[in-house]
Amino acid sequence: MALIEAEGVHVRFGDRVVLEQIDLSIPEGELHGIMGPNGAGKTTFFNVLTGRVRPSRGRVRLDGEDIGGLSPHAIANKGIARSFQVMTLFNEFTARENVMVALPSFRARGFDARRAVAADAGFAEEADAVLASVGLVDKAAVSAKQLSYGERRALEIAVALAQRPRVLCLDEPTSGLGTDGSTRLAELIGQLKNRLTIIAVEHDMGFLFSLADRISVIHWGQVVARGTPRELQQNDWVKKSNLGRFG
Amino acid sequence: MPTSPDAARLVTPAMIGLWLLLGSVPLWIAQVGLYPYLGVEILIWSIYALAFNLVLGTAGLPSFGHGAYFGVGAYAFGLCQFEVAANLWMCLGAAALAAALAGLIVGLFISHRRGIYYAFLTIAFGQIFWTIAIKAYPLTGGEDGLLRIARPPADFGVVAFDLNDNLALYYFVLVLFAVVVVALWRLVHSPYGQVLAAIRQSETRAAHLGYNVWLYKLSIFAISAAFSGLAGGLFAMAQLSAFPDVMSLNQSGLVVMMTLVGGGLVSFWGPVVGVVVYLIARDVIGALTNAWMLYFGLMFVLLVLFRPEGIAGMVKPVLERRRRREQGGSALKLIFRSG
């Protein structure tokens, strides 16, 4: 059975239809790429998955349970984590603190107003382990606003990983990264690939074609093509557009 | 606020230093030309400003009608005494509880908002409470206020202290101030405080990390209101009366100004610094000219323009530099390590 499933998802803002009809079914462990031109509705679809936007019609299911229209925190609690296209890290926090507040163990103690965070070494250890997995452990005590762009991107992913999600939604993870950064990120995502279900919106086609198990192409609020990277390269729609050229 | 090296302590060296200093105030305050009652005012307003800063500095919520909760506490203290029982603990409890309830009700209506909309709603609700205080004559005495509020003795079972003397009241309020400081220091450095700090920086991100932002905003508003109400109850006791003017927009603005001047956005102690500076400036400049608010206002404008982090924001880098130098191996660091 599919872990995450969208069925006839339709979103309109006033009289503007942003998503016409999205049907997607992603099995557990798959890395599913989403591509499409600017304004195709990719980010809106992410916003539906993570609760920022309520679908006007249609259903979203996580492991068979309808999660369409739940609030962002309820969806996050069910195990869907996301990174943001425009980075929204906690700038005053250190890298370690950014990861710490994302930990489920920390969240469980969220209303604890008596014991000091610093008195519990477990939080810092757990956070550092996550930072180590993205190669940021040296920067644990540096405030997020002082990190380089590439490091902030890596921290974005660390924060999402710290939530121990079942589904990880990455919104343009390579945007703004140079070739080097993209390569390192591809390695990192490659390592995560078999342990997590990942949905990635991405403009960098080389990146997506080399990593994704399957790709859906969204255009005009609909899925216009889908398949493995190899299948998509043969797809007429993709061939006619310039999307497939990089494959 | 950056994490303090003393975050995990129950009582920090800075707290002990401050308490000792405050404890000695009655010994010398008359010698420097001030009067002992000023000390009581400073302590009460410090509790109020620290409570207010939970909302402004910790959670980043601009509340500009906080006088309402201070005022509700003051009236509740008086009404409890007149209508229920003239017991100090009950009346102070009633002050905190009534203010918490008021904060909770207001919080229900505003916690889904942020920024300027949040600020305006807090002002609007503050004005509602102020209007009620003026109009509900049978309950609050209208503009005449609640008069003849007594100071019930602090009864600890085995021993009871009479608080009618301002010196006794000063030490009683100092003990409460110490308890509030410890409780709020714990709160600010707890996971709860950390989540609030996260919400201050990005509500969106906090929500996507699984935190019910609305509930956190609601709860801290009610907690802040409760401590503000406690301060209001103490104020009614100190003044022997309760008046609507503490609930006015004007007076609500004062606590915001004190907190910002002191540096509440960057330091736990900022609000206390602001209260001390404000009240002493009131008395010292006020003795020279009636237009003292003009000068204090000018100082506020200059500070906001050039040192938006307040007085604590100016002092902090100096302290930190000193701390770093001391960590060079000097034994002095053991003595001077302060929060």
Image (spheres, coloured by chain):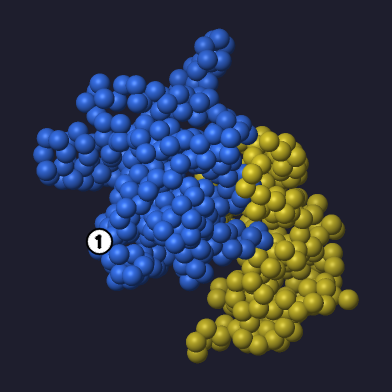
Chain colours: A yellow, B blue
Give me the residue at 49% from left, 21% from top. B323
In the rendered image, which quarter is residue A12 located in? Answer: bottom right
Q: Nearer the viewer, residue A97 or B29?
A: B29
Q: Position of residue B258 (x, y in %)?
A: 33, 44
Assess disc 1: are there few (<14), some (14-19) or many (≥20) residues with their C-alpha within 10 Å of its C-alpha.
few
Q: Position of residue B172 (x, y in %)?
A: 45, 36
Q: Position of residue A102 (x, y in %)?
A: 67, 52
Q: Nearer the viewer, residue B177 or B250?
A: B177
Residue indicated by mark 1: B144
User: Which quadrant of the rendered structure holds the C terminus of chain A?
Assistant: bottom right
Q: Chain of mark 1?
A: B
In the rendered image, which quarter is residue B4 located in? Answer: top right
Residue A229 visible? The answer is no
- In screen coordinates, is B245 left or right of A5? left
Give me the residue at 40% from left, 51% from top. B232
Q: Nearer the viewer, residue B116 or B335?
A: B335
- In screen coordinates, is B68 left or right of A7? left
Q: Looking at the picture, which amino acid does disc 1 mark?
A: Asp
